[in-house]
Image (tube, grey):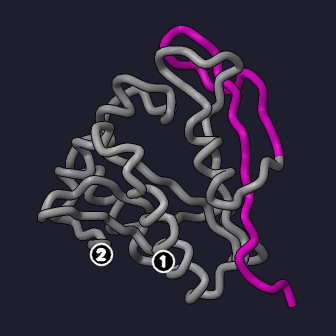
Amino acid sequence: MIRNATKEDAGRLLDIYAYYVENTAITFEYEVPSLEEFQERIINTRKRYPYLVLEENGIILGYAYAGVFKNRAAYSRSCELSIYVERNARSRGYGRMLYEALETALRDMGMLNLYACIACPRTEDEYLTKDSEQFHRHMGFTLIGEFHQCGYKFNRWYNMIWMEKLIGEHN
């Protein structure tokens, strides 16, 4: 089941996210946010954008949300996406289901351009692979830019790429 996230989901979502903060370079955050901060993130995101969770048998196994691409009126039909799936529930199609539901909700809102900012290794290592880039390609995103050695975590430098998917007519 895919549904809108609530403030009450924050604890479980934070459990999923904490693994990625502490053990990967998928996110460039160094510290796991507090429960209160994570609740505020959900509340603030939901003021303008969808924030979805995927449940199976009553257990949240992943979440995805949209956010501001750039904070100017001219970008109001563009947004940035993020997705996190429970590490032991990956490769089951949950990411695809979440992104498809998110894309549908965004299209219904009138969004036209979707962007993903993705940490990308120069060489894959124990903290970061190219899985996220490959997932986004599989979902129809194309590479539009790369920033070199801009993210520093676990005593190494990582690149960042931007990917884009156009989902509507630009009339």
Q: Which residue is mark 2?
A: 3
* Residue sitting at the far front: 92
At numbered mark 2, what does the secondary structure look like: helix, strand or loop?
strand
Q: Nearer the viewer, residue 96 or 144?
A: 96
Q: Quadrant of residue 69?
A: bottom right
Q: Position of residue 46 (x, y in %)?
A: 39, 73
| Mark 2 residue type | Arg
Magenta highlight range:
145-171
Which residue occupies 84% across, 84% down?
Answer: 170
| Mark 1 residue type | Arg
Q: Position of residue 21 (x, y in %)?
A: 38, 31
Q: Position of residue 107 (x, y in %)?
A: 61, 83
Q: Is residue 169 left or right of residue 10?
A: right
* Relative to 24, residue 137 above or below: below
* Relative to 31, residue 75 above or below: below
Q: Position of residue 67 (x, y in %)?
A: 54, 64
Q: Which residue is mark 1?
A: 48
At numbered mark 1, what does the secondary structure look like: helix, strand or loop?
loop
Q: Which mark is residue 168?
A: none
